[in-house]
Amino acid sequence: MLRRVIAGLALTAGLSVAAAPGAMSAEKVELTIGKLLELTGPLSETGPSQDKAIKLAIDYANKQAAAAGVPITARDVGADVQGDPQAALSAARSLIDQGASCLIGPSITPESIAIANGATIAKRISIWPTGTSMRLRSIDGKGTIYRTVPPDSLQALALVAAAEDLLGGAEGKLVSVAYRNEPYGEGLSKDFIAAWQAKGGKTQGPVVFDPQQATFDSEAGQIVANDPAAYVIIDYPDTFAKLGASLVRTGKFDATKLIVPDALAFSTVPENIPAAAIEGARGTRGGTPTGTESAALFDKLWQEAGGVEHFSLDANSFDSTTLCILAAAAAKSADPAAITDHIRAVTTPGAKAFSVSSLDEALKAAWGGEKINYAGVVGNFEFAEDGDPTISLFDIFQYKDGKLVVLKQVDVRKQ
């Protein structure tokens, strides 16, 4: 199967440990981080920003390690997972063959499951997906699968909060639900429906559609039937461009009544999605605490690097990459199993706290054998037993003039 592989060395200028003041005496750790990127396929909109986020994390960590005199450097190798489980497994094996000690991505849960079952669990290589489906927890990852993004069981509550804001409450309000037929849509729609009905709301559907079908006119008609108060549509960009056009053709669709999840969270709406299908729509995505030093530093690094715009969950991949490097420092090793075994040593509840701006000190402490509690751009992780984060902050946004504007943030565990 055709596979596009991208490899690049992270910037290493000025990283000579021998020249660093106070350098620690130990054998240098040279770490390779694998990037499982959605460069083609249904989530290809996410690939460039994920690639950029991982590269930024590696470059920043390398510089911070040099400043701290910690003898560790990282580089990246990448491959296109193509939105396909078998292609994703082939991509992962290619990266492992190139020496990858941990894998960042992919974004689609069936891909992650194929990789975990076919490669990473047996080799005890940690994998850090941005896919949010609860289906990921249907397999026993044996402590190798970690996410820095809240799962869909929590995003469903954020969608409920967005719908309540739009409609002034749930009681008696009819929401039409539709989803792309795969685990992401299935699980998120099920959890939303249960939560909305528990608040006294009504639902119709769900309308389930095959992303490969030629036309979506029938499904569009079902979605707008009975003049619902709102629509929750769970889809990927490639399909929504077609479904959105079908919705507009009904003559009954009002985009200001639409609510979408993180897969349709764009900094700028793609040109192939009709404006009438999405302008004024609201949505949810995993949130980054605003006004923090870490968030400001991450955005500064992003803007200085130039290139692609932010996309949903790029900060999460930046954090996942950093945690892999910190775990390697704690293990003093690039051995995948040793890194996996030290992830919780750098996210230990109650241990000394570090952040993005103090990464140099975090690396020094981890290398010195201290347990630390590293908080990234998106917050403090303190992973649950299954490897999911305990963070539960979400953005509620709206599209205005084709741009994503955050309206508010909600911590769904506190709702």
Image (cartoon, helix red, strand yellow):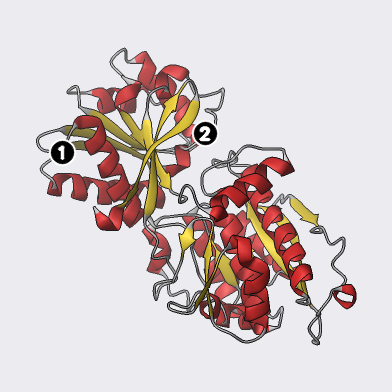
73 or 199: nearer the viewer:
73
Give the crowd class for mark 2: few <14, some 14-19, many >=20 residues within 10 Å. some
Cα distance, mark 2 to mark 1? Answer: 31 Å
Q: Does residue 39 show up?
A: no
Numbered disc 1: secondary structure: loop
Residue type, label 1: Ala
Q: Examine the rendered structure and indicate whether residue 173 appears above or below residue 182.
A: above
Can you tell which mark lies on residue 238?
Answer: 2
User: In the image, is 41 to the left or to the right of 412?
Assistant: right
Numbered disc 2: secondary structure: helix
Give me the residue at 60% from left, 56% from top: 318
As drawn, the residue found furthest toward the top would be 251
Q: Examine the rendered structure and indicate whether residue 193 appears above or below residue 402.
A: below
Can you tell which mark lies on residue 9?
Answer: none
Can you tell which mark lies on residue 170?
Answer: 1
Label 2 close to label 1 by CB (< 8 Å): no
Q: Residue 62's spot in the image, x, y percent? A: 75, 65
Give me the residue at 58% from left, 56% from top: 317
387 or 64: nearer the viewer:
64
Q: Residue 384's spot in the image, x, y percent? A: 39, 72
Q: Residue 177's spot in the image, x, y percent? A: 27, 37
